[in-house]
Image (cartoon, coloured by chain):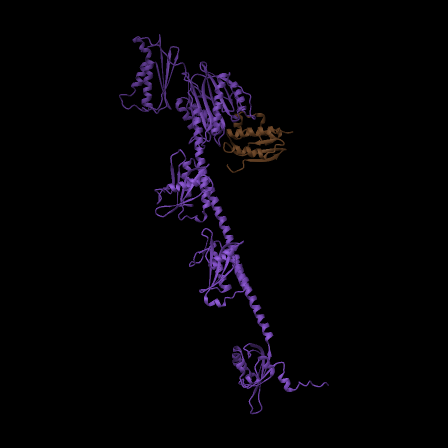
Chain colours: A purple, B brown
Amino acid sequence: MPAEPPEDSAEDLYDSAPCGYLSLRPDGTIVRVNRTFLDLTGYSRDELTGRRVQEIYAAGSRIFHETHVAPLLHIQGEVREIAAEFRRADGTRLDALVNALLRDGPAGAPATVRMTVFDATTRRTYERELLAERRRAERNATRVRLLQELVVSCAAIEHAEQIAGPIVQIGGEAFAAPRTGVWLLDPAEAALRPLHPDGDLVSLDDLGPEARAAARLEVVRHTGEDGARIVAPLLADLRVLGVVSFMFTADCTAELSFDDDEIELMRTIGRQAGQALDRIRLLEETTRRAWQSGFLARLSRNLDETVGCNGRARRLVELLVPDVAEYAQIDLAPAGEPAWRAAAPADGRDAAGWTIPHDVLATVHAAGRAGPVIAVPLISTDGRRATVLPLRARNTVLGTLLLVAGDVAAAGNIGPEFLADLADRAGLSLDNARLAERDREVAHTLQRSLLAGQWPKDPRYRVVTAYRPAVHSLEVGGDWYDVFATSGESVGIVVGDVVGRGLHAASAMGQLRSAVRALATARDGPAEVLRHMDDFVASFAAGQMTTLAYAELALDTGKLRYACAGHPPPLLVQPGGVPSFLWGARSGPLGATAAGRGRSEAALTVPRGSRLLMYTDGLVEQRGERLHQRLDRLAALAAEHWQTPLASLAGTLSDGMLPGEGGHDDMCLLALDYADAPPFRADVPARMSELAGLRAVLATAEAVANSIEHGYGLDASRTVNVLAQVDGDVVAVRIADAGQWRPPRSALQRGRGLALIGRLMDDLVIDRGSGTTVLIRRRFGEQAGRR
Amino acid sequence: MSGERQVRVYTAGGCEVVQLLGEIDHATAPLVERDVLVSVRANTGVVLDLTETTFLDSAGLLCLDRVVTAFSDRGAPVRVAAPAEGMVRFTLDLIGFLPDLLAEDVDSAVAAMAF
């Protein structure tokens, strides 16, 4: 058996044991201590012997010893693996594990406590690190959760102001910040605008941490007398949209030692909030754009539907109130025209209208001709704000648009760019209306001058014409009519229709009208005229598909030659009201390829007293009705009114065919009355007895007087139709009025006129239908004068 | 009527059939003309079907004439289907539309062009 090492004596084993040994009295007084303990703690044996072990415990362990270790020792007799902390001689701490055993002494002798002390420094460090790791993991989990909550809350917000709530919450929960402030960047003011009511507007050149964080795009720490702030910028793609400031009071400043992770968290919060703000900004921008384009589209449509420059200006101000402004005023002063104003609302405190000072007006005009539209602010004497914008088009300022924004519902959607766009469109729309008015005026003037004509005066026929423009169109059409003498003995009558509207159609109409006139006097007959018109149109693009009816009436014989190029047929109403359409000699419109071009003509002899009607399709075309039914209706109307005097016929027919305001197309109508018979003519011998021959004249005068007095009630605007015919030795006179027959006013007058006529003439027939027709006849010569 | 398509094109019996719908007047004729000219290839025969046309004014007639001319110029035979009882047949007769180009309905128009 090997020899024991010399040092393994009991004494040496005790002193150099791998743990500290202490022998204590029950009250803790150190009786004996081994060297290992002295080495661990740095005390000398003398320093410890006689002192109580409690005195070398660190504060926490001392209390633990008194309250736990000592009582347990007394009850159980031992304690194991108590973590204790000793104070070393140099003041540092010794982490240790302690076992203690209470041993009763020999009888009568006091009990002793044997205590072993193991150095546990490494183990405790490890434990502490473990704990710190766990705490950090917990904190990270909390942060991840808070960050997730922030992302969710940010996704739910719809207005930039709502961003404050989630940020303030995370400031409290993640950093225990007593206060968290959020500022949003206001680019117009170059400042940060606080979202909390007691915050101040912070200029971007401020020296405080908020402005610095916004300028540096980085988290800024700041410690001052009143406490500390950590400010993170709210960023979206390196653009600052605001800042968040976590504010800590002075008394928690000591604890304010945030590590890199926490600073990173603040940065992340700033980015999350920034992205949310960016999304909201985009959303608001989209909403605003949608509202703006919707409003402008509505505005344009409404303006387009409104006629005339002044009408549009009136409509415009009405449309701007109340969405865009609480008061809107347009002052128009186009060059060379009188100034004109439209304002809305007409009542209210702006009823008197705003007067725009000359300097403002000059600024608007100077800035307004070209380049971007510039709004000029204007402040009234009572401090109200208005904006003055130029209304311009084609490098001219037409006038101004003044807006008093006030407190309008759509204020959030209105910005300078929108107002500029609005003024631009309004200016153009007003100018277009003005130009259209001018064009229309020119076209109307042209049309009037083209259609005005001196009809040849000839007692053998009478002509009336009527032109009625389309109801819903502002442009002139290309309809025309014309009457001219082709020779001494015949008259040419034409009605035509050029396709299209406006100045273009009106000028084409003028050329075609002249061409027909020229051809009609030079060529022989309607078919020839149409053939040459085809040639004319072939060299003249505008007249393609022109329809035209042309007729020539020989005045002495009543022979009528006519031809229709795609035109509705002329209507002949013979005496007695017998209507017939002239369906002969039809061919296609001028210049048409899909319609017949074989020009022919038809001829017939019309009896005296006949009426010829020529018209354009506007009179007979009606949506939803068949054309042949419309033609039938026209024939019936014309027959019904065959005795209606020519002067009122055109009105009667167009009213009858187009009840209400009128048709969809222009309409023109030409009516020709072929005089009944050679007019009554007499050479009266200067003998008293010959007066008898003038009896018919006297009787006629009486009948006309009757018509005037009883038929028309002395209405001087009406006419009485007198037709006299001499047939051999019989003179017949027809006196017709279209009035309501009224009874004579007094018994004395009753029938006096008729009685007189009865005595003067052989026959008297009175026909009261629509109006009154009186027929009187007398035979002259040998068999005459029965009375 | 504005906004609705007034021109429909389909193929029948080897021909392109162009249906013209509704009112063809001053307001719509230029659009109808453009629509017809761009949507019809006119490689073979073309039938312009006016059965569903409710109104034709002078501008509508001009449009029809120009379309017929354009297709004829491209060498495509053209027929116009307009039933005797339709709303616009009378108008076509009135302006002297060539009877040879007219047919009672699409089928007879197609048959008339049988190659």
Residue B43, x across and y down, in percent? 63, 32
* Residue A165 seen by the camera: no
In the displayed structure, A515 sits above or below A189; it is above
Q: Is residue A329 above or below residue B72?
A: below
A184 shown above or below A681: below
Residue A510 picture location, percent across and down = 47, 24
Drawn side of residue A414 relative to residue A722, left or right: right
Is residue A120 visible in the rendered image? The answer is yes
Q: Quadrant of residue A76?
A: bottom right
Q: Residue at x 55, y 92 (%)?
A: A108
- Residue A369 position, x and y percent, is 45, 39
Position of residue B12 in the picture relative to residue A481 (left or right): right
**Which part of the image, by quadrant, shows the N terminus of chain A?**
bottom right
Front position in the image: A259 or B13 = A259
Percent across and percent down for residue A176 are 49, 65
From this viewpoint, which residue is outermost toward the bottom? A108
Closest to the observer: B78 or A432? A432
- Between B97 and A72, which is closer to the camera in this rendering? A72
| x 62%, y 84%: residue | A15
- Give the answer, above or below, for where A138 lies relative to A627: below
Q: Residue furthest right?
A: A1
Question: Which quadrant holds the C terminus of chain A?
Answer: top left
Count of all numbered marks drawn on residues in the image: 0
Q: Between B18 and A393, which is closer to the camera in this rendering?
A: A393
The picture quadrant where one finds residue A22 is bottom right
